[in-house]
Amino acid sequence: MFQDMTLEEIRALQQKQQLAFIDVRSPSEYELSTIPGSLNIPLFSDAERAEIGTIYKQTSVQAAKERGLEIVSAKLPAFIKEFAGIGPRKVVFCWRGGMRSRTTATLLSLMGISTVRLIGGYREYRSWVVETLSTMDYAPQAYVIHGNTGIGKTAILNRLQEEGWPVLDLEAMAGHRGSIFGHIGLRSHNQKTFDALLLEEMLRLQEAPFVLFEAESKRIGKAVLPDLLIRKKEEGIPIRIEMPVAARVEQIIRDYRPEEYKEQYIQAFRQIKSRIHTPVAAEIETLLRTDRYAEAVELLLEHYYDPRYAYTADQYGEHPVIQFNVRNAEEAFEAVRSYLKEVKR
């Protein structure tokens, strides 16, 4: 028989053993938002769910249940086989912990497959995320990486993270680099997905003495930072990196790969074109169209990004600024890592 558990009970169990979370909602629901790390084994496809919903509204609840049973019966062997290949312990959930997860858990139980069902479903998980982000106290000291566009802040954080340093990669969680061009080549995440990824990572690092993250604005693509993180940024120890323009241009070309997404960058540029002096804006667009990306980026830095950064550069809070003047991103990484090693002692 399957076992119903609250989210609190499941998270406590998760500390002791490995759990496989399985979202049995339709693919589109799963795509929109889910519990991070979950697999999607839908009881009904999007089309099947829509059909059953129509029958429910236009005919009757009983007719909808009967049609649902027909659909599930036809795919039952493959459905069970897919679950049987997942281990060790399974947690199934749907939207509200209702019919779909109950049906799944019952079928698995009949086949001797042990299953836990999340009471309240994904809706309960989402409520917990929102509540926790708005009320939690987060102890680790924040070290916040500042600097003009192109100094390689994300690259620095990624390399530190690979070495095991406690990093919150906010842009990765948002699926966005934070600029008008930030979505290109990436898959932007909505607020629900961002919140879930952020909270899970914050909890994973809650015993760390400090965390590092980039000095982002309140909005990153489709996601808005919670007030908790804004406060941590304002109270954090600022690490500012200064780097020559040529090295920054090189880093931007490496990160954004304009040769792969030329038309998308041109279209994105048109959204900010009116904010740049007309002759300069025209020159930038010409450079983009003729594949002279480095020259275009340099003009963008000079006439758009650097002036915008200078406007907010003094917003560091109470802590003195830790500043590194470097020649390139490699030196920036080495400088930050050396500093953190001293902090850790």
Image: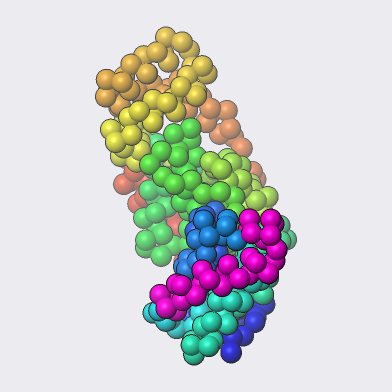
- The image shows residue 147 at horizontal and vertical percentages of 47, 38
Q: Is residue 60 left or right of residue 50?
A: right
- Residue in view at x 38 percent, y 21 percent: 299
- Residue in view at x 33 percent, y 22 percent: 288
Residue 311 seen from this side: yes
- Residue in view at x 58 percent, y 89 percent: 1
- Front residue (pair 213, 316): 213
Outermost residue on the top side: it is: 279
In the displayed structure, would residue 330 be above or below residue 6?
A: above
Residue 343 seen from this side: no
| Magenta highlight on residue 185 | no
Q: Is residue 280 left or right of residue 190?
A: left
- Front residue (pair 26, 195): 26
In the displayed structure, would residue 274 be above or below residue 66?
A: above
Q: Is residue 243 left or right of residue 238?
A: left
- The image shows residue 49 at horizontal and vertical percentages of 56, 60
Q: What span is colored magenta in the figure?
A: 53-80
| Most common secondary structure along the magenta stretch | helix
In the displayed structure, would residue 18 be above or below residue 164?
A: below
